[in-house]
Image: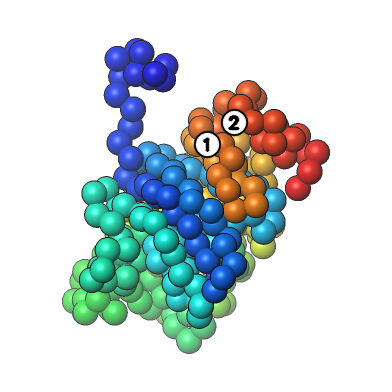
Amino acid sequence: MSIVELAGVPPPPQILRAENLSAYFDKFQAVKSISLGIPQNEVQALIGPSGCGKSTFIRTLNRLHEEIPGAWVDGAVYLENDNIYLRGTNAVDVRRKIGMVFQKPNPFPSLSIYDNVVAGLRLAGIRRKSLLDEVVEKSLHQAALWVEVKDKLKKAGTSLSGGQQQRLCIARALAVSPRILLMDEPTSALDPISTAKIEELVVNLRKDLTIIIVTHNMQQAARISSQTAFFLMGELVENGPTKKIFTKPKDPRTEQYITGRFG
């Protein structure tokens, strides 16, 4: 029984959970039977050495993994009570609820800042300008970018700096009102100032949605996450409150990785 349960306070509800989830590239198994629950309105960090399955795992959580030729999944992922891998489930609908931001900023090169933000809404058939205007301003505010771009919304998204482009991609993901935001090393290509802005943004966003972030930066995980999971060779070694993982991990392999003895 956890300290939270002993204190009579129910643990936070899990908005997403993987059950016996394995991911393959043809015959190669990159993720090995992982079961992991993600609490609602928390920041969950995924850490581990390169090639340990973190990025593959995060892509299974909104069915992006299956877009790779020869890639497939065994097991289940539940968004609340719905298995997103259930036959007949629309993967596009899943990705509206579980958005993603990638390692390198990827604004649509032919679109303006405005059109980048509303791209997902237009794909969903939403055309009313007053609504699109409202969503653009709200999403850019959420991404801490509105003040910097409000007078140049017609300029190309690619005209922005790297850090601004990444926040534009976050605004684009937020525009369709996701429940969960997946972030795969979103600051690895950014300078320290841009990284600090993204980290502050992540902390603020947890009030509105759940965030799962892959990071190689131990200090970043410690700063912004409430839960941390350690991956090694496709397996989930350990998961728990970030403070506990970084100060008193249960598994010696976790301690060895965090203290820099390998990885």
Figure check: 218 above or below 189: above
In this rendering, position of residue 160 left or right of residue 179:
right
Q: Is residue 153 visible?
A: no
Q: Amino acid at mark 2?
A: Ile
Rendered residue at 66%/39% (across/down): 219
Figure check: 103 above or below 240: below
Figure check: 147 above or below 47: below
Q: Is residue 236 visible?
A: yes
Label 1: state its secondary structure: strand
In this rendering, position of residue 82 left or right of residue 24:
left
Rendered residue at 69%/51% (across/down): 49
Rendered residue at 72%/39% (across/down): 257
Q: Which mark is residue 245?
A: 2
In this rendering, position of residue 62 left or right of residue 221:
left
User: For mark 2, does the 10 Å Cα neighbourhood hold few (<14), some (14 to 19), or many (20 or more) residues?
Assistant: many
What is the image's colouring? rainbow
Contact? badges 1 and 2 (CB < 8 Å): yes
Q: Position of residue 200 (x, y in %)?
A: 52, 45
Q: Position of residue 158 (x, y in %)?
A: 55, 77
Q: Which residue is mark 1?
A: 239
Q: Position of residue 68 (x, y in %)?
A: 50, 76
Q: Position of residue 235 (x, y in %)?
A: 58, 48
Q: CA distance from mark 1 to mark 2?
A: 7 Å
